[in-house]
Structure formats: structure tokens, C-alpha cells
């Protein structure tokens, strides 16, 4: 379910932003999260294709969000 995945990604983003003391959009925008929910990247090479995913964010957050996607899709 794409909506459930988006909400889980949003929660993960908000938690990471809170821990870092930054605005949620500084981690990823909603549009980036919606694209993740739609494309469901499971590999770092897939995650690179997501708009708003620069190298720094990929290295910092890529694996965290891949694990979240796998968890929601029951692939872990």
C-alpha cells in the first residue's frame, strides 16, 4: 500500500529530522518521499534515481530508508 509506505517514510523522516534538530524538509521533501513510496527502491543504485537524492543524502539516509521500505513491504 503506497499510502501506508508514504506515512511510514514520513514518520522516519520526521524522527531523523527531530534527532538532528532540523526541519523535516532538510532531510527529504514530501515529493521525494512520495516518489520513494511509488518506486520502492530496494538498492542504493535504485535510491540514486530518486529526485532530491544527492550523494550526501544518499550516503546519510539511503540505507535507513531502504530498510524502512523493506520493513513495510515485509521483505526484511
Image (spheres, grey):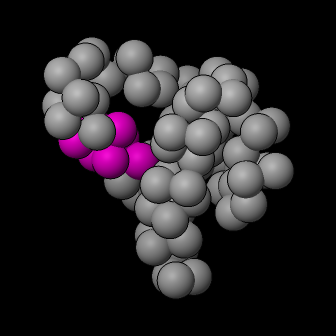
Residue drawn where x is 51% and y is 39% of the image: 60
- Quadrant housing residue 27: top left
Residue drawn where x is 18% and y is 35% of the image: 19
Q: Is residue 75 visible?
A: yes
Location of residue 10 in the rendering, given as x and y in whole percent from the top left corner: 36, 40
Magenta region: which residues? 9-15
Q: Is residue 12 above or below residue 60?
A: below
Residue 10 in magenta? yes
Residue drawn where x is 45% and y is 73% of the image: 71
Q: How many marks?
A: 0
Location of residue 1 in the rendering, given as x and y in whole percent from the top left corner: 52, 63
In the image, is 38 to the left or to the right of 24?
right
Residue 72 in magenta? no
Residue drawn where x is 35% and y is 38% of the image: 13
Q: Is residue 1 visible?
A: no
Our reading of the magenta stretch's main secondary structure is helix
Location of residue 40 in the rendering, given as x and y in whole percent from the top left corner: 66, 56
- Nearest to the observer: residue 24 or residue 60: 60
Location of residue 15 in the rendering, given as x and y in whole percent from the top left corner: 22, 41
Q: Is residue 39 above or below residue 51?
A: below
Amino acid at each position: 500500500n503506497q499510502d501506508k509506505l508514504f506515512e511510514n517514510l514520513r514518520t522516519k523522516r520526521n524522527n531523523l529530522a527531530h534527532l538532528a534538530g532540523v526541519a523535516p524538509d532538510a532531510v527529504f521533501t514530501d515529493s521525494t518521499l512520495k516518489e520513494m513510496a511509488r518506486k520502492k527502491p530496494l538498492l542504493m543504485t535504485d535510491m540514486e534515481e530518486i529526485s532530491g537524492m544527492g550523494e550526501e543524502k544518499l550516503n546519510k539516509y539511503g540505507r535507513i530508508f531502504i530498510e524502512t521500505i523493506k520493513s513495510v513491504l515485509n521483505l526484511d
